[in-house]
Amino acid sequence: MSRGVLQPSQQKLAEKLTILNDRGIGMLTRIYNIKKACGDPKAKPSYLIDKNLESAVKFIVRKFPAVETRNNNQQLAQLQKEKSEILKNLALYYFTFVDVMEFKDNVCELLNTVDVCQVFFDITVNFDLTQNYLDLVVTYTTLMMLLSRIEERKAIIGLYNYAHEMTHGSSDREYPRLGQMIVDYENPLKRMMEEFVPHAKSLSDALISLQMVYPRRNLSADQWRNAQLLSLISAPSTMLNPAQSDTMPCEYLSLDTMERWIVFGFILCHAVLNSDPAALSLWKLALQSSSCLCLFRDEVFHLHKAAEDLFVNIRGYNKRITDIRECKEAALSQAGSMHRERRKFLRSALKELATVLADQPGLLGPKALFVFMALSFARDEIIWLLRHADNIQKKSTDDFIDKHIAELIFYMEELRGPCAQLVQNLSVCPEDESIIMSSFVNTMTSLSVKQVEDGDVFDFRGMRLDWFRLQAYTSVSKASLGIADHRELGKMMNTIIFHTKMVDSLVEMLVETSDLSIFCFYSRAFEKMFQQCLELPSQSRHSISFPLLCTHFMSCTHELCPEERHHIGDRSLSLCNMFLDEMAKQARNLITDICTEQCTLSDQLLPKHCAKTISQAVNKKSKKQTGKKGEPEREKPGVESMRKNRLLVTNLDKLHTALSELCFSINYVPNMVVWEHTFTPREYLTSHLEIRFTKSIVGMTMYNQATQEIAKPSELLTSVRAYMTVLQSIENYVQIDITRVFNNVLLQQTQHLDSHGEPTITSLYTNWYLETLLRQVSNGHIAYFPAMKAFVNLPTENELTFNAEEYSDISEMRSLSELLGPYGMKFLSESLMWHISSQVAELKKLVVENVEVLTQMRTSFDKPDQMAALFKKLSSVDSVLKRMTIIGVILSFRSLAQEALRDVLSCHIPFLVSSVEDFKDHIPRETDMKVAMNVYELSSAAGLPCEIDPALVVALSSQKSENISPEEEYKIACLLMVFVAVSMPTLASNIMSQYSPAIEGHCNNIHCLAKAVNQIAAALFTIHKGSIEDRLKEFLALASSSLLKIGQETDKSTTRNRESVYLLLDMIVQESPFLTMDLLESCFPYVLLRNAYHAVYKQSVTSSG
């Protein structure tokens, strides 16, 4: 079609600009990914680094774009072998370059059409047309520049073409043009300066129209402050008035975008700089504002050097080169501080805006323009800092390090929040294709308030495209309705279009004005900013803005490059996870420090610390001062709460402040969605608290395996309660269920191992009491004092490293029960029973060794002479008594533990405990033993004493031997009781068997035999289904007969502690639920018991006197 009959309406300028701009971004994405792949040795095509192909690649690049396959068989021989693989693997790269060439052809064609149509451009009137035109020019320029930065482009294209030639016998049909394009655009800007000579008029007109917008946007912070920019409260009378402007879309147009238009645009049409002062003014202002511009993502363009290199060879451009150098100096010396002050202003302005809108969300409607302006301004400043901090050799580093950048990003996210909540759910609707002026009127007049009230879904995309098309039709020369002559129409329609975007295109508006997905490509800088934010306590409350930024990343992907979605998605997930994890760790560390401080304060209140205070009080009453004069008086607990000065800040104050700031950030959003994955910040904190609480509890036991030292249960309980109090206070800062943390952690501590397979306080304390305390009891260093209900150290040559009473008295055992709970105490009991069962197994072996003698003694207890003769035949008598004593000691310890558990549970669950107790006390005698044992097991778990110990029954049941018949087992059990009964008189000869009324027991723990005899008998004869009562009567008969015999002995050494041993019979009966005093009276005269008590009490008084 000749130019004379070119119909502007048929050129579809609006559609072509829209499609080519989108296509251009897609091509940039693909070329960017190729450049990054070629720059990464791991991702680079293997053919480019293959040693076998090295000579072929060098040859191809040297000859490029010529193709010579015949005379170089040696160099290309390896290529011949791999041609099919090369065709397959380099096709994506090659055809991407072909797509770039096609894109270039289409852009050039459209630019020619625009020139022929003499399109009128003015950013303030036909905004969409001018914006899309300038975007296309810059996209085209950056694409060709990025293409020239791929060093391997000739090798890739050449390799593919040679492989194609070898396979198909001819070059690819696109290769000649593609090869020539690559050669032509070695220096892309220089080539494009020549190319754009015919387009200079259209391009310069579009750029010069920015003189009404760019200088107004590129102001200093002081000028913004004087104009009270973005302030809703500066003019209260107009607060409810809608924010209006003749150039609505220009108000939130990105400053960064305009600078790219100006710099690249005037490089391409540089002649206008010499002829138009307005153009020169825009050019110099842009050069003074930045040292580098964004080409695409993290690829930058150092504008001063590039412009100088281009202009230096043009005659008559000395003045322009001088301008560039002056602007460069200004940019290096002043731009950093100017942008720093802008960020400082924007922090306060956005904070005010967010606060006012949070308080009065209704203002968002009339003042929406302010919000998008604020977002756009802040985004420009953040991107400027990110780009320059990473790419410029700075004179003053302070201007390029902003520790408060997180605050600005945070306020951006706060402003995005209300807008994102207003987004309506759009269904995809077909666009109208009729572009007529009346459609605007029809669309607007058909709107009504009722549609809003009914919740109708609006879609104005068709209307906006119609306006774009109308701009194209009315901007060409000789248009019947020229928009240049009807500027008011343009201004009115631009305002209308802005308001339609407020209805159905808020997401797109948010991406346009506040998308920060560029951080995805500045990972190191991103992570460094995050670390700086966490290190500064005043900024930590804004740290949530970093994981929130990860939600932006997917918006930088493009449908023309789907393969990068997965890579960017993974990066967004890993960064978001890392940020949230670091925030939770930081909060956890602060909480741990607070807990440590509180544990220290709680420790000061322990009873052991009051001794010194009491001592000082006593000394004050006496005349003589025992303390040194210079010794400072010990501070009393609570002194840290006395403040003489409000300005005095303690370490605890600082920790609480830092924690509250960080918790604000963690609690800011309940969850966030990143690439279809939902992240919940609070859960990160919860999981970290669980792990740290678990480690802290175990750590606070201070268990040392080498020295067998461990913290007292009461002190551990105090520390745990202090820890829990601090953790409960976290609920004031963050909406987390701290009770769930307690349940998870403390319940795990009642088991042998936690969920990670690590030892718990249950296993540590069980091990310590069994291996340390009870072992020392067996060694004779510790005795059980029934009067004190505690184990007490005995005076020995080698002093123990711990005081047994401090670990076994009532308060300590109650503390242990509080810590371990019913589950933990059950595990402790089972471990104790395992030790008892091993002792019983040894006792049974001793019985088997003496089975014949014991069988005779069982039936001869009324024949003293025969019994004496048989007794001498018994072996291992002392071993039997010692093992039974050990069993008694273990059962005494368990009795203490069970009593403590009952006391604790009675406080926590009194009604449940009383119900269990009632249930146990009212078991009918005729109840089946299995049913009764179930009730006993329930009672035992609640700490209640039972006639038959279910745990002991279970432990001894597991010992049944397959080789021995049940009758034989029963016989051994009976003979064991006989063995113990007939062995008791030998205790009288032991010097340590003396009964002490003060402790209500014997120093060698033989008083524990009472518990051992009763519990073992009850358990064994329950297992063997014998009569417990009959067997205990038999035991009593044998024991009393044996003990009566020593009353007739004359040897003082064998009867040394006869009276003390007599008392064991009374203890056994008192301990037993199956024996009575009447029964004892029938076997052993009560007068002997009375005299025995009298004797031991008299001896006690004598020895103490």
Image (tube, grey):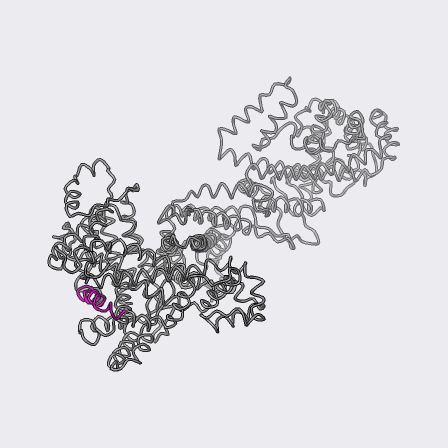
Instruction: State the quadrant of the C terminus.
Output: top right
Q: Could you tell me which residue is drawn at 24 percent across and 72 percent down? A: 283
| Magenta stretch, overall SS | helix
Q: Which of 767 and 33 is in front in this view?
A: 33
Instruction: State the quadrant of the N terminus.
Output: bottom left
Q: Extreme top residue here?
A: 926
Say whether residue 661 is visible: no
Q: Nearer the viewer, residue 720 or 497?
A: 497
Residue 112 place in picture, x, y as percent: 25, 63
Q: Could you tell me which residue is drawn at 55 percent across and 52 percent down? A: 699
Above or below: residue 1015 compared with residue 234: above
Query: Does 201 lie within the magenta span?
Result: yes
Residue 309 place in picture, x, y as percent: 33, 78
| Side (left or right) of 195 relative to 534 | left
Q: Which of 761 and 556 is in front in this view?
A: 556
| Side (left or right) of 541 relative to 822 | left
Above or below: residue 241 compared with residue 173: above
Above or below: residue 471 compared with residue 155: above
Which stretch did the figure color magenta? 196-216
Say whether residue 79 is visible: yes
| Side (left or right) of 48 relative to 1029 | left
